[in-house]
Image (cartoon, rainbow, N blue to C red):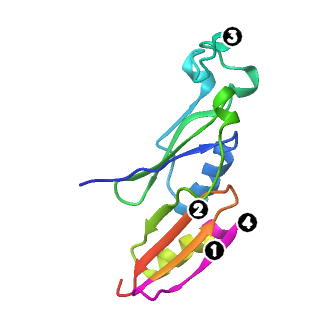
Amino acid sequence: MITINPYLNFAGNTEEAFNFYRSVFGGDFLTIIRFKDMGGAACDSTPENENKVAPEDENKIMHIALPVGKGNMLMATDMIGEMAKTLNHGNSHSVCINGENVEESGNLFKGLAEGGMTLVPFDRSTWGTYFGMLVDKFGIQWMIDCPVNQ
């Protein structure tokens, strides 16, 4: 079985985003590691900051994982230091979810759309599924798809 586990990058609000995602998908975090838990090691490897976490970044999320569905994991990190300066949320990626049935898929769409922007309303598509696209309140694009007969 092959699984694809999206890994998202945030500009300091990973914890807020993942609490929201947990409210939509349910379940508990499998892993939550803060930068302060890394014993001083950080991703900011510039010479002046080598192996140091800035005090304002210590409580940010180094890694978080939320099981979603069967065998899938949604994961993320807060970008800190120099990496944070290059983070751009854009339209170069989407997380696609294939729901078990139309009701479940519609509920996921509704939950993720809360506070965000609907791009394509969740409805019957021309290709024979129920489909919708949205950008959630954290700037992440989602596609929800479900065969009509499920």
Is the residue marked by circle 2 packed among few (<14), some (14-19), or many (20+) residues within 10 Å?
many
In this figure, which residue is indicated by the disc labeled 3? 48
| Real-space Cα separation, disc 3 to disc 1, in angstroms | 43 Å
Q: Position of residue 64 (x, y in %)?
A: 53, 40
| Real-space Cα separation, disc 4 to disc 1, in angstroms | 13 Å
User: Residue 115, labelled with which disc?
Assistant: 4
Name the residue rendered at 40%, 85% in the picture.
127
Is the residue marked by circle 4 packed among few (<14), some (14-19), or many (20+) residues within 10 Å?
few
Kindly give the residue lying farthest to the left in the view shown.
1
User: Residue 141, labelled with which disc?
Assistant: 2
Do residues under tags 3 and 1 come within 8 Å of each other at their CB atoms? Answer: no
Do residues under tags 2 and 4 come within 8 Å of each other at their CB atoms? Answer: no
| Real-space Cα separation, disc 3 to disc 2, in angstroms | 36 Å
Mark 4 vs mark 1, foreground winner is 1
Image height check: is 111 above or below 106? Answer: above
In this figure, which residue is indicated by the disc labeled 1? 119
